[in-house]
Image (tube, rainbow, N blue to C red):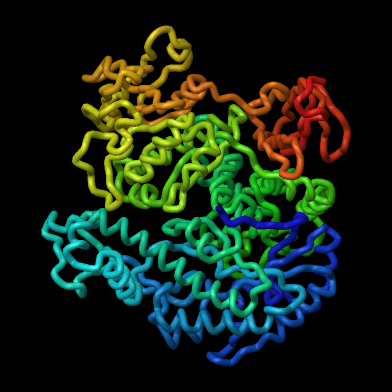
Amino acid sequence: MAKSLNLNRFELGVCYYPEQWPETMWADDFRRMREVGFSVIRIAEFAWTVFEPQEGTFSFDLFDRAIDLAHQHGLQVILGTPTATPPAWLTTKYPEVLNVTQAGVQYRHGERRHYNYNAPIYRELSARIVRRMAEHYGQHPAVIGWQIDNELNCETNVFYSAADNTAFREWVKAKYTTLDELNKAWGTVFWNQTFTGWEQVNLTGPTPNNSPNPHQALDEKRFISDSAISFARLQSEILREVAPDQWQTTNGLFGHLDSHKLTEENLDFFSYDSYPNFSTIFGDSGPDPLLDRKWSWNLSIARSISPKFCLMEQQSGPGGWVNRIAQPSPKPGQMRLWAYQSIGHGADMLLFFRWRTATFGTEIYWHGILNYDNRPNRRLKEAAQVGKELEVLGPVMVETRVSAKVAIVSDYDNEWDGELDLWHGPYTRQSVQAWFKVLQRRHIPVDSLYLGAATTLDDLSKYEVLIYPHGAILPEDVANKFTDYVKKGGTIVFGCRTGYKNVNGHCRMTPMPGPVADLCGVTVEDFTRIENIETAPLLKWRGNKSANSGPTLVAEGFNDILQTTSPESEILAEYAGNFYEGAPALVRHHSGKGQTYYYGAVFNPEVAEALVEEIGLTSPTAEWLELPQAVELIVRERTQREGEIAMVLNYSENIQTLNLNRAATNLLTGTTIKGKVELAPFDVIFLELAEPGRNS
């Protein structure tokens, strides 16, 4: 069961840095926060030197005054452990705590997250500052919880210090026991990479073509994740011992970190940092991009870790460092829209970043609610509007949960292996993006489902349809769960490059798609990459399928040429072009009460659209609510009684028209509405059928 945030009311707040502002401003800041409707602040995650100005000398005066004053104003406090930014006295005296690049260059003091997780002295000093803080604030009536570190694996997610190499050696010893087993797992007989002594084993280093042993590289990422989790556990165990009545979490969602395992083993729930305006820089490719709406997928991933979670940093202004990441300012209404995007997808506690924009340092352009001049502005007005609205909506949100019958399946092994392996990694990113875009446009809510050792058949069976685009590494036990899921009535959609690797990343000497070949009713007779010099073949559907009269469907990226192996296999589409013209490209196979689709190429939006039609997926509100493509639908299911709430978010700069075929209640106004309803640019509406289950 996933760890989840459990609150009986919605908490709204903001990140605050008392050490960065004159003490004369604190009381006015706290007063204004309460006027806006904030009830919680996060502080201290970068303040190690304030707490320990010299090694072994501790001072709590500044934060004692700040926390006591916040408490007087009715604000609750989340304390950050300050280990993301070690003090200069620490990195100077103990340079072994600094991280090192793969090329062997040691980082200097400055910026943040310049340390490594495995230096014994850093672990010792981190444990000490956490213990001292927990002993000091563990019973403070204002302190409700702790954020461990800040954004683990942000800035950099690779580590090559001497301490990391030593720890990696011990990690592989524990995993493989003998050098023979290690050599077998890493396939070191290839290119004469065989190890004959443990002292020879290190993390990957520079190679002539930047192409390390792929199996070693996969284990390296697993090790980095375990190192971060171990560092978090070091702190969480202290907090659990010394401050047992205060919850603990950590924030972020970054590479080479199994956030599901991290949360399950160490935390009470997970927290995410949402900056939808990154879409202006890292928007999805192709026509009609989702832009800030794409951040709903990130929030779905956070929800897969904790069904209800904290939004520890919610974007309020334009973002940017002095030397990178320059974003435009959120348009009027977007700050509120993004807050409800996060709330709709599972956040029961939300803190805006930050109260006031810093006037010095690297993040002087990472704007908060207030600008440098400290005067009221439109962002403060929007925050106050959210605060006021949550007086009405907060109890509803806390009492409901996100409802989805479709899930896109992922796992960390394939993510990490796919970073190096261009024969499947880029395909997954494209296919997930295509499926999410299509499901969003069709108003079909979708969950993210991460496979792990703890994943059960019940976890799969919550969904009517699973989409697992290119699971190259697919263990037999997972294949068995998929088989049981389909036999019980589920539907799975697979794509090319499925199941051909084992857990070490070795290619299986069995017919592709490996352990799900029987489930799919196909084998891969041949395959080819579609390179730039070639033209990807078209898809031709068998019979008079409507897909043949719609947009031209292209089998992009990679083509598995399929052969059916079961009388229950039905060829739905074939390749039209290339040397394998007429060969099966899409096959449906019935097994028990369910069905499996195997598509031999990389998904694009057009193919995903055709499969949505083929499977018969529709919006859960289609019978009573007609929606334009420019809006997002989030369905929230009541947990205390029957009923669902439809949240509709307008990401467009234009008015969007909804059509309600049945009477519904606008939960913000309490009015009953039916027929055509206009939704203003960047606006949100919360609808509940006036009489669930009955026509009006």
Which quadrant, please, contains the C terminus? Answer: top right
Question: Residue 133: x and y, percent?
Answer: 63, 81
- In this rendering, the count of numbered labels is 0
The image quadrant that residue 354 belongs to is bottom right
Question: Residue 450: x and y, percent?
Answer: 47, 47
Question: Residue 174: x and y, percent?
Answer: 30, 69
The image quadrant that residue 240 belongs to is bottom right
Picture layout, residue 366 above or below residue 146: above
Q: Is residue 538 visible?
A: no
Between residues 532 and 350, which one lies in front from this camera angle?
350
- Is 240 placed left or right of 391 in the picture? left
Between residues 237 and 365, which one lies in front from this camera angle?
237
- Is 647 placed left or right of 490 in the picture? right
Question: Residue 57: x and y, percent?
Answer: 59, 92
- Point out the residue furthest to the bottom here: 57
* Residue at 31% from the left image edge and 65% from the top image edge: 102
- Is 215 placed left or right of 377 in the picture? left
Between residues 104 and 76, which one lies in front from this camera angle?
76
Between residues 520 and 496, which one lies in front from this camera angle?
520
* Residue at 39% from the left image edge and 32% from the top image edge: 494
* Residue at 68% from the left image edge and 78% from the top image edge: 138
Picture layout, residue 7 above or below residue 634: below
